[in-house]
Amino acid sequence: MNFSKLSSHLNRYKVALAVFAVTFFASSTSFGVVPKSAINPNCSFAFNIELEEYGDGLAIEGVSVTGDKIYPLEMVHAALKIYPATINLWSEASKADPNFLVASIAEGYSNFVLNLNKNHVNAVAIDLGYGIDPQNLPKNKSGELMAAFLVEAKDFLIPGDAYNLPLIDKSVNVYVSHLLVNNIDDVNDRLEILKEALRVTKDGGEIKIFGFDEFDRDIILNLLDADGRYQSSSFKFEPTLTNSIHVPPRLQRKVTGWYLLKINLK
């Protein structure tokens, strides 16, 4: 990935991560239960992650880490077009099927998945940052918020890479990603994110990815046509103008807006 650095005057941290043998156990709380059957027990990784502190902010591998203070839950729901009725539907599906799963990719310290589980939805969040020991995070505002989130939501977090998710094939009913692909300059890398979403999403499942730009539409359709699993009638590629949501200027590409891709699979 070709991430632009946020500043040439950042305090940089190198955090060595141990190998993560991704074994994830269902929560024993009253919240939604994450099905172990979805987790790939053979997926592990080991690498150094670069943390960057800039004022009150925090970046991981050059990408600003955001959460509820910058993108409130209502804003995430609006961008992904998720409504109370949607959450009720997912809650009922989770009660009926213990293997039903919503996966949110590159969530940062958003309250999205935590809120879903509080509403009895089986949901998991996957992000590179979830493998970091909270003690190793910068002691600024974003670092403290991320550290608190890692503790509060630990039952529903998995460290992982959006290009190689620690999930088995066709294990997710709903794949969502909010403001990940907008950070990726190369369109081919953005498509790799979509390919991985297609791999892990079940037949009959749904994919929602927010953050594409207007020029991605045709190449996305080419990929989907070649894959052959999407319902063409379900394809939606809808704009949300950048001036309608709070986006720091340093994170914006020079496009008219960001788009939500929504598809259902056969």
Image (cartoon, rainbow, N blue to C red):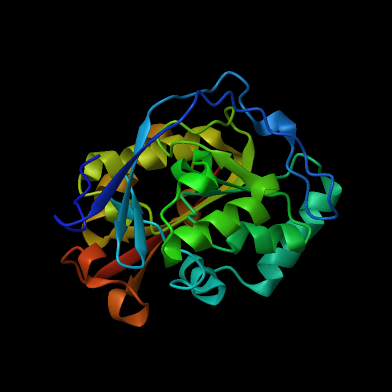
Q: Nearer the viewer, residue 225 or 241?
A: 241
| Quarter of the figure with residue 187 | top left
In the rendered view, would you say 200 is above or below 3?
A: above
Q: Considering the image in quadrants, where does the N terminus appear?
A: top left
Query: Residue sitting at 49 percent across and 74 percent down?
Result: 75
Q: How many marks?
A: 0
Q: Residue at x 36, y 31 (%)?
A: 48
Name the side, left or right, on which 62 lies relative to 129. left
Q: In the picture provided, is 122 more to the left or to the right than 230?
A: right
Seen from the viewer's position, the closer of residues 57 and 4 is: 57
Give the image location of residue 254, x and y in percent.
15, 66
Residue 252 can be seen, yes or no: no
- Image quadrant holding the C terminus, namely top right
Vertically, is 44 above or below 138?
above
Task: Let me know if residue 34 appears in the view.
Answer: yes
Residue 112 vs residue 7, the one in the foreground: 7
Q: Position of residue 184 (x, y in %)?
A: 26, 49
230 w.r.t. 36: above or below: below
The image position of residue 262, as x and y in percent, is: 47, 57
Which residue sits at x=73%, y=42%?
34
Q: Picture quarter containing residue 203?
A: top right
What residue occupies the far bottom of the structure in this picture?
244
Q: Residue furthest top?
A: 42
Task: Residue 135 in the image: state x and y as whole percent.
Answer: 52, 47
